[in-house]
Amino acid sequence: MDLFLVQLAVVLLCIAIGGKIGGIGLGAAGGMGLFVLAFLFHLEPDSPLVSVMLIIISVITCITILQAAGGLDLLVSLAEKMLRTRPNAITFLGPFVCYIFTIMCGTSYIAFSVYPVIAEIATDARVRPERAMSMSVIAANMALVASPISAVVVGMLAKAASLNITLLDILSITVPGTLLGCLAGCLFVYKKGAELSDDEEFVRRKQAGEFDLTTLSAAKIGNLTQAKTGLAIFAIGVLLIVVLSSFKQMRPEWHGEVMSVSTTLQILMLTTASLIMIFCRIPPEKLHEGSTFKSGLIGVVGIFGLSWMTGTFFGTYNDLFITNFSHILNEYPMVFGLVLFFLSILIYSPAATIIALMPLGVAMGLPVYTLIALLPAACAVFIIPGGAQIACVAFDRTGTTRLGKYVINHSFLLPGMVSLVMSVVFCMLIAKTFY
């Protein structure tokens, strides 16, 4: 037991170091922990999650090519037009747009292009921007567990393969559950804080001449036909992924084995990317310019090192965990949700959290639909402010969206907690009612 505690301390220390550094530092710290476990404690390394990493690479390749075709700019332009038609409803429509964007593209980074638009529309409508901005970040984050091509959902499918769940099984719970959870969050912030005209910081900025009245221009689309074509091909590709991943009889079979969901998704994403590239006639030099590819690769490195380390540790002590904790988790499944919650805060990655801990939940015999319903608990990355929160504070020219001087007392904390808790509650209710 003493050796177990020492090794657990090594794992937690490396997670803490990686979480503090962030980005590729998370993967590097995981590799360091794996070195200690394998070379000093002689634990046999688990197999790295090659299939999950290849899926993420294929998805970000497709998104990058879509970005080069102007498809992402077209999405932003369409979203801006919709938001401007109902500016007074920006507290609800802004988060909804970010939620849909993330579901379509599988990454919350896509919402960065919409945050400035949401901030501007809220300001012009004299709606306190903090309300829409805070929930937009949270909605984009919660949508990760409801996207058919996100690393979170893909990781769940890979790590719970023995339970024979389909993509449709996951989405039928997480999509309505997180949508209702985000709606609860929007209702929570609907009257949060003083009205914009009465906000002390906004009044101070106006009086000091610090409030910039400049209006942002709409997203510029180079070739509208090209952008529409690319977006249409991408939408069809995502739809095919949902259908083929959910109905195995539609996938090819060899020697009695049906093509895996992992392989299906990789092939479809790369095929979709190729079709966009061919039909939109994208110049080769534009294929590597997108910001999405860089951010996606950073996520791959993080999952690579961290999941390899945690997989090695939990795999070694799998029987120990099952013997000592399975009855507790089966009787109180929310305990597993709390573990997901706190680990996601520490490592700042819902995908890495699911990949690290989901095998433990499966091994301990938790019902499959309980595991699916607990997926939103891994989306607690909003607790400690990151890039999205910092960017939104900068985008809000009125000063109502704040980080606070005590790190966690920021504009995103309470809306995020309400949305996360209610998403888990709604997902649980849906899972127990229909499954």
Image (tube, helix red, strand yellow):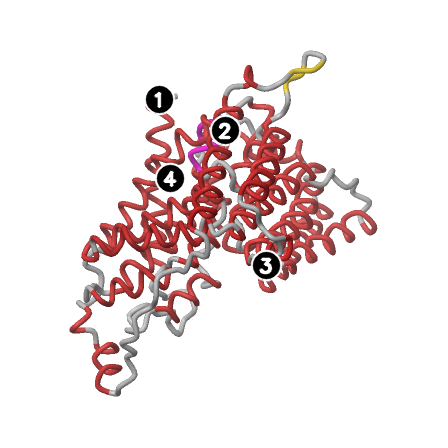
- Spatial CA span between label 3 and label 1: 45 Å
Label drawn at residue 240: 2
Tell me which label, 3 or 1, sits earlier in the chain. 3
Q: Residue furthest bottom?
A: 208
| Left or right placement of residue 428 versus residue 183 in this view | right
Instruction: Tell me where residue 204 appears, x and y as whole percent.
Output: 24, 83
- Give the residue type that dot 2 points to: Leu
Cα separation between marks 4 and 3: 38 Å
For mark 4, does the 10 Å Cα neighbourhood hold few (<14), some (14 to 19), or many (20 or more) residues? many
**Residue on which disc 4 sits:** 424
Whichever of labels 1 and 2 marks the residue nearer the N terminus, that label is 2
Q: Where in the figure is residue 263, as x and y percent of width and height?
A: 64, 30
Residue tagged by mark 1?
434
Compared to residue 253, the image places residue 281 above or below, namely below
x, y percent for residue 48: 71, 41
Magenta highlight range: 366-374
Point 39% across, 31% down: residue: 173
Q: Earlier in the sequence, mark 4 or mark 3?
A: 3
| Res 289 label | 3
Q: Residue at 64%, 22% (x, y): give it.
A: 259
Quadrant location of the C terminus in the rendered image: top left
Q: Nearer the viewer, residue 319 or 299?
A: 299
